[in-house]
Image (cartoon, helix red, strand yellow):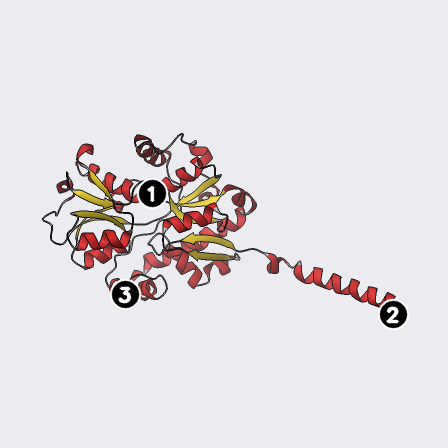
């Protein structure tokens, strides 16, 4: 009799455990998105801070990285589901055999600055002048694009590889290189320290910043990803409407350098959209010219539009 009671008790306990742990909310996995402390990621940070993802009914975990190398390694290892990245990175991932999709563009800013001691004040003066960049990255692509768009001949663009951003900043500020290309907020930081602004990526028609997700993950989570971008766009509109309200947020939550809080120039965030075929092709052509790509995936294989269509 005792044995029967014990078996019954264990059966009831098993039923209880299954009931509790089968609840949808308890097992729903959060969407993990890799971000950097940059302008592109600000709407995601604000959406998280103001519980806008929760308001949409979706769980999101923002995983912060200090470098694109760390972020990309985490994505390739399957530790994050998606990331704020760029078109070059998307093409490199495809070439490496990862099945990924671009869901939308993002709004960031990269700038070219001349050393404080330099006589350079215009982009066209960069002809045959060393420009510090990180090789085979969006930084190099944008530095090249800014210079050539301003009229510097391709043969006169002298890009020098300085991978570590703190070293690149120091060399620029000390006048050891004439110019450098930097992402925000570091571009604004060197300007605040006396470097001369020459131009930034907002003047270009390209949309290098993009949201990249694993394709298999997308197919399992289409409705939740729409909610993610609804929260992102709500946050972007909040910043657009009253940017001054978020200056403290830049420093306290987003990790921007303290001196930039009062003076930082916010970008205008746009409703999520997919990059055009021409934008993707320009990046691919640039990579092909440098023999960085073996082949280019079709636009349809690289870009999905269901998110932007739902907003």
Q: Secondary structure at mark 2?
A: helix
User: Are there few (<14), some (14-19), or many (20+) residues within 10 Å of tag 3?
Assistant: few
| Residue 138 quadrant | top left
Residue drawn at the location 43% of the way across and 52% of the way down: 34
User: Are there few (<14), some (14-19), or many (20+) residues within 10 Å of tag 2?
Assistant: few
- Expressed as whole percent of the image width and height from the top left, the position of residue 249 reads 34, 64
Q: CA distance from mark 2 to mark 1?
A: 70 Å
Q: CA distance from mark 3 to mark 2?
A: 69 Å
- Expressed as whole percent of the image width and height from the top left, the position of residue 68 reads 37, 49
Q: Secondary structure at mark 3?
A: helix
Q: Secondary structure at mark 1?
A: loop
Foreground mark, 2 or 1, reads 2
Can you identify the residue that label 2 sits on? 2
Tell me which numbered mark, 2 or 1, is placed earlier along the sequence. Answer: 2
Q: Is residue 211 in view from this perspective?
A: yes
User: Are there few (<14), some (14-19), or many (20+) residues within 10 Å of tag 1?
Assistant: many
- Expressed as whole percent of the image width and height from the top left, the position of residue 129 reads 15, 42
Residue drawn at the location 39% of the way across and 55% of the way down: 65
Can you identify the residue that label 3 sits on? 258
- Expressed as whole percent of the image width and height from the top left, the position of residue 156 reads 17, 35
| Residue 133 quadrant | top left
Tell me which numbered mark, 3 or 2, is placed earlier along the sequence. Answer: 2
Can you identify the residue that label 1 sits on? 208
Residue 151 appears left or right of 298 = left
Q: CA distance from mark 1 to mark 3?
A: 27 Å
Residue 154 appears left or right of 80 = left
């Amino acid at each position: 009799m005792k044995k029967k009671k014990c078996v019954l008790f264990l059966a009831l306990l098993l039923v209880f455990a299954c009931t509790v742990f089968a609840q949808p909310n308890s097992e729903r996995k959060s969407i993990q998105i890799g971000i950097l402390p940059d302008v592109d990621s600000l709407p995601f940070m604000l959406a998280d801070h103001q519980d806008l993802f929760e308001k949409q009914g979706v769980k999101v975990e923002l995983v912060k990285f200090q470098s694109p190398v760390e972020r990309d390694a985490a994505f390739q290892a399957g530790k994050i589901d998606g990331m704020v990245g760029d078109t070059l990175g998307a093409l490199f991932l495809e070439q490496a055999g990862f099945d990924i999709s671009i869901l939308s563009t993002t709004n960031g800013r990269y700038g070219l600055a001349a050393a404080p001691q330099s006589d350079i004040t215009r982009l066209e003066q960069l002809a045959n002048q060393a420009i510090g960049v990180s090789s085979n990255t969006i930084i190099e692509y944008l530095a090249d694009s800014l210079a050539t768009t301003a009229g510097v001949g391709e043969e006169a663009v002298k890009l020098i590889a300085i991978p570590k951003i703190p070293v690149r900043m120091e060399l620029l500020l000390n006048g050891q290189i004439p110019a450098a290309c930097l992402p925000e907020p570091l571009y604004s930081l060197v300007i605040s320290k006396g470097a001369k602004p020459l131009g930034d990526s907002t003047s270009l028609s390209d949309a290098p910043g993009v949201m990249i997700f694993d394709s298999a993950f997308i197919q399992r989570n289409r409705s939740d990803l729409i909610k993610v971008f609804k929260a992102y766009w709500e946050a972007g509109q909040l910043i657009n409407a009253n940017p001054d309200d978020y200056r403290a947020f830049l420093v306290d939550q987003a990790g921007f350098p303290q001196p930039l809080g009062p003076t930082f120039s916010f970008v205008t965030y746009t409703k999520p959209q997919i990059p055009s075929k021409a934008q993707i092709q320009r990046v691919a052509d640039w990579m092909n010219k440098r023999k960085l790509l073996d082949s280019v995936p079709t636009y349809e294989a690289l870009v999905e539009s269901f998110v932007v269509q739902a907003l």
